[in-house]
Image: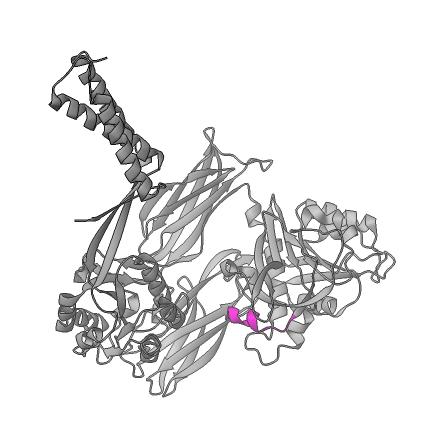
Amino acid sequence: MPDLHLTSTYHGILLLLAAAGAGALAVLAYRFTVPPVSRVVRTALMLIRGLGLFLLFLLLGEPLLSLVYHRLDKPVLAVLIDQSKSMTIQDRTVDRKTSLLDALSAPALRTVEEQSDLLYGVFDTKLHLLKSFANDSISFNGEGTDIGGALKQLKEQTAERNLQGVLLITDGNATTGSSPLFEAEEAGLPVFTVGIGDTSEPHDVVVQKVLANTITYVGNNVPVNATLKSSGMNNERVEVTLLDGGKTLDRKTLLLEPGTREYAVPLSFVPDVDGMRKITVEVSQLPGEVSTQNNRSSFYVKVLKSKMRVVMIAGAPSADVAAIRRALQDDSNVEVKTFIDRGNGQFYEGVLTDQELRAAECIILAGYPGSKSSTATLQAVANTAESGKGILFVLSRTVDFRKLQILQAVLPFTIPAKGGEETQTFLAVSEGQRNNPILRVSSSLDVWSKLPPSFTLDEPLRAKPEDIVLATARTQSSASTEPLMLSRNVNRSKSLAFLCYGLWRWKSYSEGIPGAERILENLISNSVRWLVTHDDEKPVQVRPSKEIFAGSDPVEFTAQVYDENYRPIDDAEVSLSVSQKGHVSQLTLTSLGNGRFEGAFDPLPEGDYTYSGRATAGGRQLSEERGSFSVGGLNVEFQETRANKLLLQQIAARTGGRYFESNDLQQLPRVLASLPNFRLRDVSVARQFELWNRPWMLGVVVALFAVEWFLRKKYGML
């Protein structure tokens, strides 16, 4: 039975006095009646009136009724099971899938279940808690392993349960998400880890990473730098092949030496046709490999037709101007013309004509305009940019913001009335932009956090609503929201802004930082390529959200539909056809308004697909878009095939848990029983009712007075 508690804004003594007063009034009213009635009727009328008056007084005091229920909750042990693809690896001595299932059927878990509740969950890139567990609840097809995310989600989803421990069953190889050690400590629970898999050196060869330009030109040589990792080999030979579909582009033979080693394999190809090309690096298979799914890695390259023409306008000679010009000249696909202001509105290189501006595919403004720059030249640049030319703005300390107002419409930031004081800053890549092609300057994005500081102005430069913030300012200790890199793609117009200067320092002071050797050249090259790529200026665009999907991901498509004047068409119908090996799937995209559409297929089988998207409006076909994408082949789960026992031991040690081998769980019940909090918990749950705010309470009062009135009428009382 629950405990009852009644509270009111009135003091208890006042309630007692009110009850006595209501009773006294009722007695006075019915002590003598006209006509006289029986004692039973008078007593009933006294009780009815007294109770009605008291309840009416009580409701004015806003009474609150609380019901408190008590129960005993068993301690809960969450059993988190790794269902990623790496759990299907068969090591030299261990079948991971069998080992995991054996651990789940161990008698020790049955013993634990007698004294506690087991909460089962399976995880890969996300955690899924199960209402009941069976072996077929584990899919073993996850495309990633997010141990940290699973622990964080567990804490969020079980906040009201008596969760007192976690049993984590995995091979320990976290391939995505936040730090498992950090999240385990933040969870505040003892984590008992069970290691699945062999920790000895496997017999395996892995395509670890591939670095290549994502945009190139017909007839240009494209270098592809592949990194291979081998272990457990004994001077075997393999072939490393570069493929475009079934066509071999390049091939190298490699000798795999004993021990665990990495090999840099330089490959290259020369595209002969334009378009999107899927390129694959593949290593020949060897007998006895732990996994052959990591023997290939694919990427897409967009092949364009001709060189890019760039005009760079600088406000004055500077180290940044020289560094940017060298980066442009270093790119064989760029034809650059530089115009440096002499400080009087003229340029050292001569007159900048409208023809030069019209011939350029993008314009770079490096510290331009200065205080003496020509207003007529600025207006010509603004007119050219508004016609659809890409524009890259690089800040400097000497930029005249008053004159820069002429370019306000084409720049991706709002221009302040005046400049500020110089301040030193580091650069932090925005979390959602880590895979943005503009920032893809190295095989690792960590290189950005290791760069020397640049400079910016303390006068805030704000992003426009349509902008994408690529990077923000960072001090030594924390990141801010002040943008340092912005991109904008609106109404057929692209623009980029680097709101920092001293970029030459990234080149000159980065010696010894892995991946930073060509960071400035790659950043400028990526920026120019993004600005001059005009495929997204088509009136109708139908595209997959990415080029390679994981096997468990829905295949998402987006579309934009405009008329000839680039006005959005909302009543269009966008139909999509996806095919692979004769099998065709159809989909109609859903309108989001303003000419935008989206839709998704359920996860598709692994393989290469082609798609055709058609947009129709008013019974007329507007356009047809074709392309390709791939499902699977990312192989991130097979990049590391050894079990990470050390990580699991660290998680257990830092959280007060313990590490177990998969075949040695006998001590688990005893260890859990020794935990001070692994006990029954007395839980009190209160339910509160605002009696004064309940319609039925007012109904009771009205009903009491109605019954009193009825009895008085029945007996003819005055």
- Locate the C terminus and report the quarter of the image it occupies: top left
Answer with left or right where residue 98 lies relative to residue 311: left
Pick the front one: 21 or 397: 21
Q: Is residue 508 above or below residue 304?
A: below
Q: In x, y percent, where is residue 516?
A: 58, 74
Residue at 62% from the left image edge and 54% from the top image edge: 532
Is 208 in the magenta? no
Q: Quadrant of residue 325?
A: bottom right
Q: In this view, does 174 lie above or below 366?
A: below
Q: In x, y percent, where is residue 697?
A: 27, 31
Q: Main secondary structure of the magenta part?
A: helix
Pick the front one: 154 or 595: 154
Pick the front one: 308 or 522: 522
Q: Is residue 695 visible?
A: no
Residue at 61% from the left image edge and 58% from the top image edge: 483
Is 448 in the magenta? yes
Q: In x, y percent, where is residue 195?
A: 26, 76
Residue at 74% from the left image edge and 66% from the top image edge: 321
Answer with left or right where residue 449 lies relative to residue 135: right
**Magenta stretch bounds:** 444-453
Q: Is residue 237 above or below residue 114?
A: below
Answer with left or right where residue 199 lies relative to residue 136: right
